[in-house]
Image (cartoon, rainbow, N blue to C red):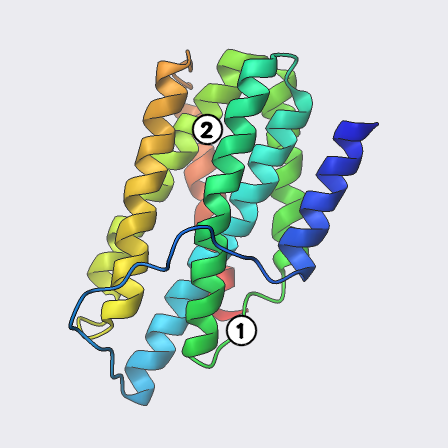
Amino acid sequence: MDSLLNAADSALRTLFAKPHATHACPTVPEQSTELDVSDSRSSAALMRVNHVGEVCAQALYTAQALSTNSPSLRAQFAQASFEETDHLAWTAQRLGELHSRPSLLNPLWYAGAFGLGLLAGRLGDKVSLGFVAETEFQVGAHLQSHLEQLPMGDHASRAIVAQMRDDELRHAHAAQDAGAMELPQPVKNLMRAAAKVMTTVAHHV
């Protein structure tokens, strides 16, 4: 019952409360960001997608912590979720600075990611960790692509995305070190296709 209540609390805080980071938002020293309207809109769309990714990360880690029977793995998932809260806060803050908003479909994204996390967890810890590793590697590649797409003058967004990329890859390697299995290529392809749909829709809605 406590685990279920914690999962419900996590969902409510992710979707409806203002996230609070434990670490300062990354910045580029001595470089200020000044964007025209077009660049500001482009950055906002990309940061909205990144914010959706962090909403999904909270859902995935919460679901996987709920479904594992391993206390050590549950603690690892909880710690990763805690660290991802920084990303959630930073992207939300940046969206506000860009005079934009999060995705209107965040409850849907959260529910879908939570379901996937539960499914992965029910298939066993090695599968669950494999799902984490593959997800984080794909997210890392996605964030790298955003660094190539963000306006060069948007130093604020670029600093956030660069730090997020490094953190996601660290989480992927931690999952591998904990015993993640290598997922079959068709599963990886399906995950990539689902992510493409989500990022395309979130770019606009």
**Residue 21 visible to an observer of this rendering:** yes
Label 2 element class: helix
Instruction: Give the side of residue 43 with respect to residue 14, left or right.
Output: left
Q: Residue furthest bottom?
A: 37
Q: What's the CA distance linking mark 2 and mark 1?
A: 27 Å
* Residue 81 percent location from the top left of the image: 53, 38
In the rendered image, the vertical position of residue 128 relative to residue 153, given as above or below:
above
Pinpoint residue 11: horizontal percent, then vertical percent: 69, 47
Q: Which residue is mark 1?
A: 101
Q: Residues within 10 Å of mark 1 (few under 14, many from 20)?
A: some
In the picture, residue 7 is in which quadrant? top right
Q: Amino acid at mark 1?
A: Arg
* Residue shown at the point (42%, 19%) measured from the top left: 183
Q: Residue type at mark 2: give it.
A: Val
Q: Which residue is mark 2?
A: 132
Q: Is residue 202 above or below residue 58?
A: below
The image quarter in which residue 155 lies? bottom left
Q: Quadrant of the N terminus?
A: top right
Q: Is residue 197 visible?
A: no
For image coordinates 37% across by 57% down, the residue present is 24
